[in-house]
Image (tube, rainbow, N blue to C red):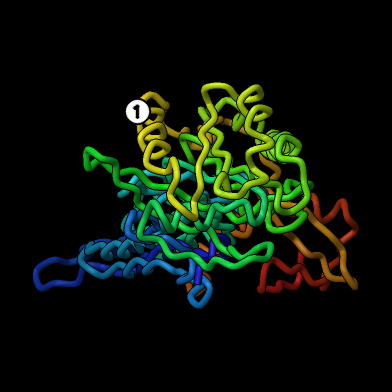
Amino acid sequence: MFIDEARVYVKGGDGGNGIVAFRREKYVPQGGPAGGDGGRGGNVIFQADEGLRTLMDFRYNRHFKAERGQHGQGKNMHGAWGQDLVVRVPAGTVIKDEESGEMIADLTEHGQEALVAKGGRGGRGNSRFSSSVNRAPTVSENGEPGVERWLKLELKLLADVGLVGFPNAGKSTLISRISAARPKIADYPFTTLTPNLGVVETRDHESFVVADIPGLIEGAHQGAGLGHAFLRHIERTRVLLFILDAAETEGRDVLQDYETLQRELASHNPKLMERPFLVAANKMDLPQAGANRSRLEEAFGERLMFISAVTGQGVGELIERLHRLLQQAPPPEAEEVEEAVVTRFVDEVPFMIDVVDGVYVVTGNRIEKLLTMTNFSTDEGLQRFQRTINRMGLEDALKAQGIKAGDTVRIKDMEFDYSE
């Protein structure tokens, strides 16, 4: 089954916890702190694989989580890093953040990689907190949580030539004649329900890939017919081949068909109008096609080819023309991904306070991360947490909200009773 859209959840591995430990060996009195750091969590990496042609695998497996880092150990031994999780996707896959719509990567080449969820750093052991004032700290950090997010995957097929035309124009018949592809062919609209790829060989035994895109109709860029689902696949092609029904077997005017196709492509992506193209007037084996011959020659000139996909008339010459046009055509452009701009000293709001049913709910990335990485099993860890939130200004902000002794403060899943 051909699947070209998927929604997946990814999570980088959590960092390992740092530990509290002291050096205790014979003849080494007061050895000092020796708690090692936790290891970094593994990253989730998507890698393009030219051997894949569909996102079918992601219909049944939608959750990908990298390995967490190992915890630190005594004798200043640090935990091992978590193993990265490499997920293979078809070449031509666009990766977007579902919440923001931001494009993360456009993987167009075999082996190309994108880091989609970074692993968390390992927590520090107590040896990191030793100082001239505190020679025997009993404080350590938990590992940082890995990045987690929902992603939207969109596959755009990579092909040299894209066949564009109305339903029943003869695209499927043509690709079945010029390649080993065997799409479903019948005398009714929308016979082709998924894109088909075929490898075409020239007289000189060179080859190129042709994509048979399901038929477009007027309004396709707005979702009419099947166009909205498959217009994206045309964006990857280097050359366009418009297949027209010269015999007008469906009762439409052949030149109006071409104008409609042009409008739909331009409405979807104006850059498609810059692509090299040829026009194939199909069904020339039918008597009524001859009446449109002069009109078509006047409209398209040297770009026009007369063919019959059923009998093979003109098909060999069409293949050679397409191959020559491909040799001159530029490679397809990958979608631009905005480069990340690192801004230092950003005035980030460390927390926000909402009062819900008498409970003071505190949210914010900085304070939630602090809570997760704090080891509350030691008094010194709790005291460090208290000092840090005081520097953030949380207590003053709670007082400004009218908090009283005994009121409940909630940060993530942890609740505290407020006291002066």
Is residue 191 toward the left or the right of residue 204 in the image? right
Q: Residue furthest left?
A: 27
Q: Is residue 126 visible?
A: no
Residue placed most toward the observer, 240 or 71: 240
Q: Nearer the viewer, residue 381 or 190?
A: 190
Residue 190: which quarter of the image? bottom right
Q: Is residue 291 above or below residue 212?
A: above
Residue at 40 percent across and 31 percent down: it is 321
> In x, y percent, where is residue 325?
41, 28
Q: Position of residue 131 (x, y in %)?
A: 36, 49
**Residue depicted at x 32% and y 48%:** 110
Q: Residues within 10 Å of mark 1 (few under 14, many from 20)?
A: few
Looking at the image, how many numbered discs can be counted on the residues?
Answer: 1
In the image, what residue occupies the spot 26% across and 70% down?
A: 73
For this view, does 379 lie left or right of residue 51? Answer: right
Horizontal side, residue 393 vs residue 76: left or right: right
On the question of residue 333 being in view, the answer is yes
State the quadrant of the C terminus.
Answer: bottom right
Residue placed most toward the observer, 194 or 306: 306
Q: Position of residue 390 (x, y in %)?
A: 67, 51
Residue at which label 1 appears: 327
> Which residue appears at 58% of the width and 31% of the height?
345
Percent position of residue 29, x then y? 17, 66
Asked whether 48 or 305 is in front, the reply is 305
As helix, strand or loop, the secondary structure at mark 1 comes to helix
User: Which amino acid is tagged 1?
Assistant: Gln
In the image, residue 265 above or below residue 48 = above
Q: Is residue 343 above or below residue 174?
A: above
Q: Is residue 48 left or right of residue 59?
A: left
Q: Which residue extends farthest front?
A: 287
Relative to 402, say whether 114 is above or below.
above
